[in-house]
Image (cartoon, grey):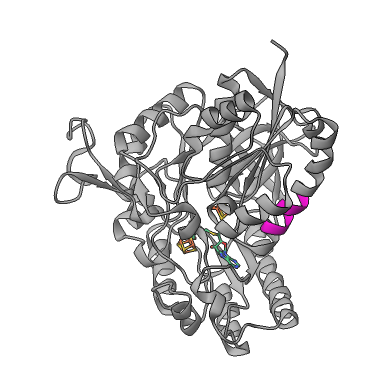
Amino acid sequence: MKDRSFFIRTFGCQMNERDSETLAGMLSDLGYRETTDRNKADVIIMNTCSVRENADRRFFGNLGQLKRIKEERPDVIIAVCGCMMQQQHIIDTLKSKYTWVDLVFGTHNIHEFPKLLGNVLDERKKVVDVWDQADEIVEGLPAQRKHPYKAFVNIMYGCDNFCSYCIVPYTRGRERSRDPEAILEEVKALVADGVLEITLLGQNVNSYRGQIRNQDKEEAGGGTVMDSSGEYVSFAGLIHMLNEVEGLKRIRFTTSHPKDLSDELIDAFASCEKLCPHIHLPVQSGSTRILEKMNRKYTKEEYLELVEKLRRKTPDIAITTDIIVGFPGETEEDFEETLDIVRKVGFDSAFTFLYSIRKGTPAENFPDQVAEEVKHERFNRLVEEVNRISAEKNRALVGQVVEVLSEGKSKTNKALYTGRTGGHKLVNFKADEDVTGRMVKVLITESSTFSLTGRAV
Ligand code: SAH
Ligand code: SF4
Ligand code: F3S
């Protein structure tokens, strides 16, 4: 058989990155190998994101470019999947304007991809198969990981929070937690394969509630990990469980919603030595009035209290966040509340976004959409403040020795190794020997807004 290859372009968050690893694993099982050259691939997949309008736009731009490839090589299979496909208006647009697409599937039937691809290949016809809802969680799918020493592990799928601006609950469906045993088994297998760091993934990991099925409950860690019924494991309980996995060095997670960040989890930072001192805690806005309109279910003061609690127990914890600028109805005063919370918390870093109207979300029809130029002006002020603080936080690490998981040589400078600290800060450093895949103590000698420089000691 001819050597066949695939190319996957992934947009969006870590959920999508993890899904693409599953698709790559399936294709690899089918005998395809990955290529970085889109123009030569036999199967091209676009795994899409619909969280903001520019993600939509980039996807359609890319898809436009694929038309030429399809014309030159009619045998190439063009497949599209991911969050955008869970919206009917997108499917309608694809059908009417992007006729060179061969296969469309969604977030809920990824496990069916090999079968769907087979249908397209055997019958030489187009296939559109998107499910409205998820079935039971499918375990045991293959994966081809991007990184040798760190891995994403899904612990739950979907989101039930319905923040008024957000499309995710519509594209990823209702919350479903994986069984703790399945997660434990996956983590042990990853560690056996050389993984040192895992990142537990969910849209809101704090509401993880995993059912204990077969495992001896004592082995699951007894009282500390289970709720009072003894049938379910909480998120903090899951971390306690994974903290016992031999050979695993680091546990991270993303994302946690402030409204249900438990004391149990705050304590886990102190009691689980593998849990990295970093929390990504999206605040979205500093104005309680806007937070209410966003349906976030916490106030500015409650958020600040959480930060104080986290720092009281774990003084060196790194706190990062997501912020939306220009939500409908946001006034200059509301925006100043956001600047104020940014200064009060002193985030290590923040992802900042211009509010983007999403079709089908409640905020789509909110009055008082903020004018583009106002949004941009506020956005620039916010970024300036966020960057100033990030640079300051990084500067404070100069002269200190930090522990870095070395992932190998830096892509931009082959003389340096690269990796991240427990606080998730990027470090480029010199080392006299090959330290790839090791935990390394690094003395920080220089800092900038987005990274640190140092040498192994
Ligand atoms: N589940 C995660 C977030 C997933 S989306 C959480 O709740 O933290 C990632 C980020 O995109 C969000 O935190 C939010 O800041 C941003 N975002 C989501 N919808 C958006 C929209 N319509 N416009 C602008 N930013 C948005
Ligand atoms: Fe979107 Fe809110 Fe769910 Fe996060 S918690 S995915 S922002 S609805
Ligand atoms: Fe985007 Fe879907 Fe993730 S909308 S942010 S890829 S959950």
User: What span is in magenta?
Assistant: 56-62
Dividing the picture into quadrants, the one containing residue 231 is top left
Q: Residue at x 47, y 59 (%)?
A: 170
Q: Residue at x 58, y 20 (%)?
A: 30
Main SS class of the magenta portion in the image = helix
* 112 displayed left or right of 443: left
Q: Quadrant of the N terminus?
A: top right
Magenta region includes residue 59: yes
Image coordinates of residue 130 in percent, x first then y, are 51, 46
Image coordinates of residue 148 in percent, x first then y, are 58, 28
> Looking at the image, which residue sits at the far left?
229
Image coordinates of residue 177 in percent, x first then y, are 34, 46
Which of the pair 35/239 is nearer the observer? Answer: 35
Which of the pair 440/190 is nearer the observer? Answer: 190
Dividing the picture into quadrants, the one containing residue 90 is bottom right
* 306 displayed left or right of 358: left
Which of the pair 193/16 is nearer the observer? Answer: 16
